């Protein structure tokens, strides 16, 4: 049974999703949220397999919700605003339902949910894939600066954007950390926090701090490993 959380500030929109989901017996709605803050709390606590997510909501919008999650579940956006569609796929949403949508359109979105075998092998497929970005282009005024992926020490979230920290300095990307992560080879880069991805080649040492870890990078920056990403460090301890 797959767990679902519906996140939308409009009662009518939540009701429609509940109605359409009645046909899917392998899914169960475990909670509903009416604003971004409530959504973050529920997703972090209940760890759903799938969320239906509105964009414009009180406190935090849909994209801000995703940025603050330790682990992002499968996402289907359901919104009245068509201008965010491209950004939705940048964060790897399964689909983008534009209100008002029909039962048929809803069914097509549900068909895009990966089956259990795909989900189980998702990490393995990332590791064996070779389709990773080796060079990034960062816009500086009217020029594009080339940054090699191997030269990135770590990446940190900066609102809707991301900072690429290198030995030559810090560079602001126009994309968020969630859009950049899939372009990085997971053999070299791991996420240690919802707002931090590190390059394993630039780790100087790791210090245990009570129930957590601090990662000291070669440039001297100290980065905390959040609870949701502890296993990514532990699995490399021999």
Image (cartoon, rainbow, N blue to C red):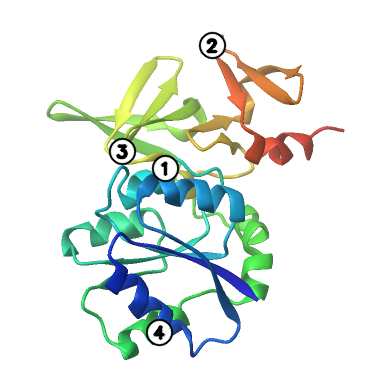
* Mark closer to the chain start, 4 or 2: 4
Whole-percent x, y for residue 217 in the image: 59, 17
Whole-percent x, y for residue 24 in the image: 52, 86
What's the distance in space between the residues labelled 3 and 2, CA to CA? 25 Å
Name which residue lies at 55% across and 54% down.
130
What's the distance in space between the residues labelled 1 and 3, CA to CA? 8 Å
Q: Residues within 10 Å of mark 3 (few under 14, many from 20)?
A: some
Which image quarter is the C terminus in?
top right
* Mark closer to the chain start, 1 or 3: 1
Name which residue lies at 18% across and 62% down.
81
Q: Is residue 208 above or below residue 227?
A: above
Name which residue lies at 61% across and 73% down.
2
At mark 2, the secondary structure is loop
Residue beneath label 3, please? 160
Residue beneath label 2, please? 219
Q: Residues within 10 Å of mark 1 (few under 14, many from 20)?
A: many
Residue 86 in the figure: left or right of residue 153:
left
Q: Is residue 25 above or below residue 164?
A: below
What's the distance in space between the residues labelled 4 and 3, CA to CA? 33 Å
Residue 76 in the figure: left or right of residue 215:
left
Is mark 1 in CB contact (under 8 Å) with mark 3? Answer: yes
Whole-percent x, y for residue 229 in the image: 65, 39
Answer yes or no: is residue 183 visible.
Answer: no
Q: Residues within 10 Å of mark 2 (few under 14, many from 20)?
A: few
Residue beneath label 4, please? 19
At mark 1, the secondary structure is helix
Residue beneath label 1, please? 67
Is mark 4 in CB contact (under 8 Å) with mark 3? Answer: no
Residue 113 in the figure: left or right of residue 201:
left
């Amino acid at each position: 049974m797959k767990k679902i959380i519906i996140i939308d500030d409009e009662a009518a929109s939540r009701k429609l999703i509940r109605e359409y989901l009645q046909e899917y017996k392998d899914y169960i709605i475990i909670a509903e949220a009416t604003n971004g803050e409530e959504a973050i709390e529920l997703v972090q606590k209940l760890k759903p397999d799938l969320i239906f997510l509105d964009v414009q909501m009180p406190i935090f919008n849909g994209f801000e919700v995703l940025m603050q999650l330790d682990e992002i579940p499968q996402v289907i956006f359901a919104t009245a605003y068509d201008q965010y569609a491209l950004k939705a796929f940048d964060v790897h949403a399964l689909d983008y339902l534009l209100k008002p949508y029909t039962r048929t359109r809803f069914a097509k979105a549900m068909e895009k949910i990966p089956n259990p075998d795909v989900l189980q092998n998702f990490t393995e497929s990332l590791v064996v894939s070779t389709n990773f970005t080796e060079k990034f282009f960062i816009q500086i005024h009217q020029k594009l600066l080339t940054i090699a992926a191997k030269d990135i020490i770590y990446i940190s979230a900066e609102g809707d954007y991301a900072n690429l920290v290198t030995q030559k300095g810090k560079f602001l990307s126009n994309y968020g950390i969630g859009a950049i992560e899939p372009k990085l080879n997971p053999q070299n880069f791991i996420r240690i926090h919802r707002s931090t991805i590190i390059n394993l080649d630039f780790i100087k040492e790791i210090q245990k701090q009570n129930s957590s870890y601090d990662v000291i990078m070669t440039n001297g920056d100290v980065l905390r490993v959040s609870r949701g990403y502890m296993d990514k460090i532990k699995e490399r301890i021999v």
